[in-house]
Amino acid sequence: MGAASDPSTWVAQHGDALYRYALMKMRDPSQAEDMVQETFLAALKARERFSGQSSEKTWLIGILKHKIIDHFRKHKREQNSDDIEALREQLDQQFDHSGHWKEPLSHWQAPDQAYENREFWQVFSACIAHLPERLADLFILREIKGLSSNEICKLLDISTTNNMWVMLSRGRMRLRNCLDSHWFNRDRDKQNPEAG
Amino acid sequence: MLSCKAIGELLSQKLDRRLSLRERLRLKFHLLICKTCRCYEKQLKFIAHAVQRLMQSSDGAGMPPLSEEAGRRINRNIRQQLNEENSKEPRRRL
C-alpha cells in the first residue's frame, strides 16, 4: 500500500502540523503559510512517487524541509553584523577587564520542570525571536536534520565553522540571560527592588 | 590560567565539537575552582537541550494552527492544480 491519501483532505489532515513546523523555522506567519502551500503543491506533483514507506506526514514534512532550506538559500537575510557586534559588546559587560565574571550567576531552581510548562516555551520562543536575526536562523537551521555545518555556513554567509561556534556561544549566553531575567529569576527584581 | 570568558566560550563549543586534550584539561582545572563557571555550564546545557526540544516538537511551544482563511486558500489552489491535471490527461483516481 503506497498510495497517498486524497489531496483534497491534506489541509485538514496535515495543515496544522506543517504550519507549526514552518512557523517555528520561518518565524513569520505569512511566509510559513506560503511554505505550507508550496509543500502541498509539490507533493501533489510527486504523489505517485510516494512509496508509503514512511507516513504521509513524515513524507510531507520532508518536502517542507527542502522548501524551507531553499527559501533560506534564495533569500539570504540582510547581513546584520552590527546587531551581532552590539550583542558581543553587551555580553562582554558581564566580565571584568581580566575576563572574570563580575557577578556570580544566580542558580536556576529545578530547570527541568520548566519543560512541562507551556508558558515557559512561550518565553523561550520569545527569547529566540529577540536574538539578532542571523543568530536565530543559525539555531533553527542547526536543528534541521541532514544539514551539515558547511551548508549552514554557506546559507548564512558565515565565513568559517569556527565563526559559527563563536556565534552559537554568544547566542546561548544571550538566551541564558533572557531566560534568567524572564523566567528563572523573574521575581528577583520585584522581591528586592534595591537589587536592580 | 584561562579567564572565565574564555572558559565560557569553550563550554559552549564543547556542545558543538570535540575539544582537544589540552582544552579539556584546562576546562577541568578551571571548573574545579570556579563555581560560577560550573553554574554556567549547567545552564548552557539546559539551553542547548531546550533549543533542541523546541525545534523538534511540532505542536509544543503553543504555536498557533493554520488559520482557516489560509487553509481555504491553500485548498483552493490544490483543487485548481488537480483540475488542471485532470483536464490535461485522464489519470487513475487515487
Image: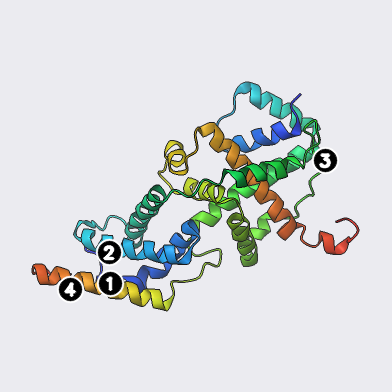
The local secondary structure at tag 1 comes to helix
Q: Which residue is mark 3?
A: A102
Q: Which residue is mark 2?
A: A41
How many neighbours does mark 1 have within 10 angstroms: few (below 14), some (14-19), or many (20 or more)?
Answer: some
What amino acid is found at the position of numbered circle 2 in the picture?
Leu
How many neighbours does mark 4 have within 10 angstroms: few (below 14), some (14-19), or many (20 or more)?
Answer: few
**Position of A149 compared to A189: left or right?**
left
Q: Which residue is mark 1?
A: B77
Work out whether mark 1 precedes mark 4 in sequence or the reverse, and give the earlier one: 1
Q: Image height check: is B19 above or below A69?
A: above
Circle 1 chain:
B
Whole-angstrom CA distance, mark 3 to mark 1, is: 58 Å
Q: Position of residue A63 (x, y in %)?
A: 33, 56
Along the viewing direction, whichever of A75 and B28 lies nearer the viewer: A75
What amino acid is found at the position of numbered circle 3 in the picture?
Lys
Q: Residue at x 40, y 78 (%)?
A: B69
Q: Position of residue B14 (x, y in %)?
A: 60, 34
